[in-house]
Image (cartoon, helix red, strand yellow):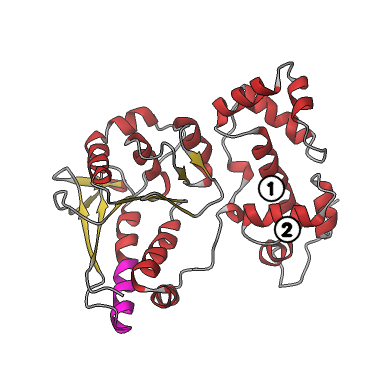
Amino acid sequence: MTEEPLRVGVLAYPGCFASEVFGVLDLLTIGGHVSRAEGIGTAPFATSVMSPRRRVLATGDVPIGVRPMREVDVLVVPGFELVPSVDLDARLAGVRPEVAAITAHAESGRAVVSICVGAFLLGAAGLLDGRRATTSWLFANALARRFPGSTVTPEALVVNDAGVTTTAGFSAMYDFVLDLVGRHCGPSAARRTARIALVDDARSSQAPYVDERMLPTTGSTFSARVERWLDQHLDERYDLSALADAFHTSTRTMLRRYKADTGDTPLGYLQRARVRRAQHLLARTDRTAQQVARDVGYRDAATFSRLFVRHVGLGPTAYRATFSGGPPGARAPRSR
């Protein structure tokens, strides 16, 4: 497709995940070999690890050899260790040189990519405002709250929006690389790269991997109380007026306060809660898809199926076959 190598630089910084630095480069290396074997250029990708610092220690105090910042076509920002005990304000303040480098690169009109929670660095650089974005499902709400000018799509694996690409957690770096290989070298090269590396190139959503028990709670905040109410009325028709009345507020105030807490709408939460409940029922019971649809508030099974596919990337039947824990076509024991 092209003889010009695509210059891809990975931005290393203190505490970044070394596996995300080298995972991107290693899969690009494989993709380059595949592309050359298919006669697509002699060097499809020119890769480097860069930093505005002279020395970088990744997670586990692993030293990473870096080059000075240079002009590249695509700048990749890996994620970092983010746990509840981490002071995110202090963490982002500690990578100001990297945020400045991201800003300078983006201002030149070239592509920027984040892996997992690397999206927080892009947000700090002002690149998420007015754009769609994603990150690990575990931190999607935190990203939406911190950067309310962005539209965060928690189910997406990879989101491309006007030169800024964000990905879901950890292994989604491979989804990004396969997409990049496909766009630069063609779909055949991407498929063969996936086969050689044993990487799944058919994923379309991170929703099947969400474990609702691990989702952070919001304590006694307004949004948490709203979500408890919605959970208790999961199988009922959504009525914004009734929801607002339950909290003695107007519909406008309800939407404003909930969005301020979560970056989302009550209906968005309710749909995700219904899908999560449906996932549990499909994987753990032998109820039909139509029965499950009714259990989570949908009288029209076709409407439920479309919602399920949009959030999960699989239809109810395919989801059951994949996640029920039994052989294809087998059903889980009926719950009591």
Q: Any magenta on residue 257?
A: no
For residue 284, say whether it is visible.
Answer: no
> Which label sits on residue 283?
2
Q: Which mark lies nearer to you, 1 or 2?
A: 1
Majority secondary structure of the magenta segment?
Answer: helix
Could you tell whether 48 is left or right of 216 in the image?
left
Q: Residue at x 43, y 32 (%)?
A: 85
Q: Nearer the viewer, residue 231 or 86?
A: 231
Q: Residue at x 81, y 44 (%)?
A: 297
Could you tell whether 308 is left or right of 149 in the image?
right
Q: Which residue is disc 1 drawn over?
A: 276
289 over 62 or under it: above or below: below
Q: Any magenta on residue 37?
A: yes
First in residue order: circle 1 vs circle 2: 1
Q: How many marks?
A: 2
Q: Nearer the viewer, residue 257 or 47?
A: 257
Q: Residue at x 23, y 74 (%)?
A: 3
